Image: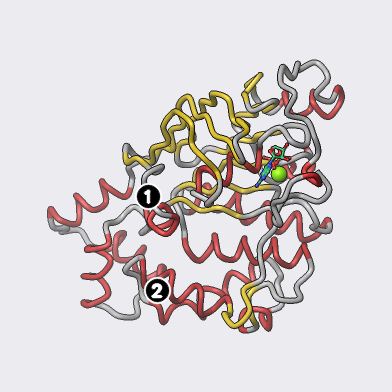
Amino acid sequence: MSEHRSEAEERSDHQQSEHRSEAEERSDHQQSEHRSEAEERSDHRESEKSTLRIEGLRAGVEGREILRGLDLEVRSGEVHVVMGPNGSGKSTLAHVLMGRPGYEVLGGTVTLDGQDLLDLPVWQRARAGLFLAMQYPTEVPGVSLEEAMSEALRTRGRDAGEARELLLAEADRIGFDSRFLFRPLNVDLSGGERKRNETLQLGVLRPKIAVLDEIDSGLDIDALRAVARRVEAATKEIDLGVLAITHYRRILGELKPDVVHVLRGGRILATGGPELADELEQTGYEGYEDDTTATEPATTSADPFADPLA
Ligand code: ADP
Ligand code: MG
């Protein structure tokens, strides 16, 4: 309920009432007949939709253009799926949106609710409400998930002390072993456990728009279902907008797409409804012409985070 509220509002809430649960917040709204104008206004803001708008985005790495004019718009509550063959630029899109160093923006704009994101450092993009679940979450020795989330909540003007409780609740929701919450972040975790870690973070941080880069890869069937369900629930509970990058239809059983895009050669070549994902599963990407030579595998790249299987 609170992700569309200003930091000032969050802070003032925390000063006035330290430990109010979400249920209390909700019941307050239901019970109080005589609500102040300020309350009405704040409700109005909460119901406002967010929009991530990507226009004419061109970006490259190491002097090579990879995204070649990409338009995409994701609003609160919507699930957009981007599918495309290996090397088509899917992860590049995710990295450029979040501001990973080394990726050069060559043209176009990216805004979140009108605010230009491309000029902001990564942490400010996150604070503005953008979230990235990485394809290959990195190990962070010496920092636990709880510590990382406490700090992230603090940056957002939320109560850092809530991190533990929120994480435990999120771990319970997706059936994740809570011992991992207090161990160094991602260290010695399997690929699937790291993906669930990313999902936990999404649940705690409650962003406006989440970019999920192959959140389904490496997950077993049960974990896949739990993660997909959690994200789908967030589209309803916090009106999350989702840009999900995936190779496979299977995640779409639980995470219901509104729009499916085919990305190839750094461009969106087709956009359609959920049926487009079914069609791709049948026919592959052959019908979608790649007019670039940008098809060499990622294994040739010097990027230590590049997909070794791409
Ligand atoms: P996808 O996620 O769709 O498989 P990527 O966005 O990872 O594709 O990669 C697109 C192309 O850009 C690939 O040819 C890849 O080798 C190249 N690439 C991506 N990141 C880097 C990098 N850091 N350095 C060099 N080449 C890169
Ligand atoms: Mg990728």
Ligand 1 lies in quarter: top right
Binning the other alpha carbons within 10 Å of mark 2 as few (below 14), some (14 to 19) or many (20 upward) gives: few
Q: Earlier in the sequence, mark 2 or mark 1?
A: 2
Real-space Cα separation, disc 2 to disc 1, in angstroms: 32 Å
Mark 2 beta carbon near ligand 2 (under 8 Å): no
Disc assigned to residue 120: 1
- Residue 179 locus on image (x, y percent): 68, 83
- Residue 62 locus on image (x, y percent): 61, 41
Q: Nearer the viewer, residue 272 or 88?
A: 88
- Residue 139 locus on image (x, y percent): 66, 71
Q: Residue at x 55, y 65 (%)?
A: 201
Q: Residue at x 72, y 24 (%)?
A: 276
Instruction: Tell me if 102 is positioned left or right of 274 in this view.
Output: left
In the orientation shown, which residue stands out farthest toward the front? Answer: 63
- Residue 289 locus on image (x, y percent): 75, 16
Q: Which residue is mark 2?
A: 21
Q: Secondary structure at mark 2?
A: loop
Give the number of the mark in front: 2 or 1: 1
Q: Quadrant location of residue 35?
A: bottom left
Binning the other alpha carbons within 10 Å of mark 1 as few (below 14), some (14 to 19) or many (20 upward) gives: some
Residue type at mark 1 is Leu
Image quarter hosting the N terminus = bottom left
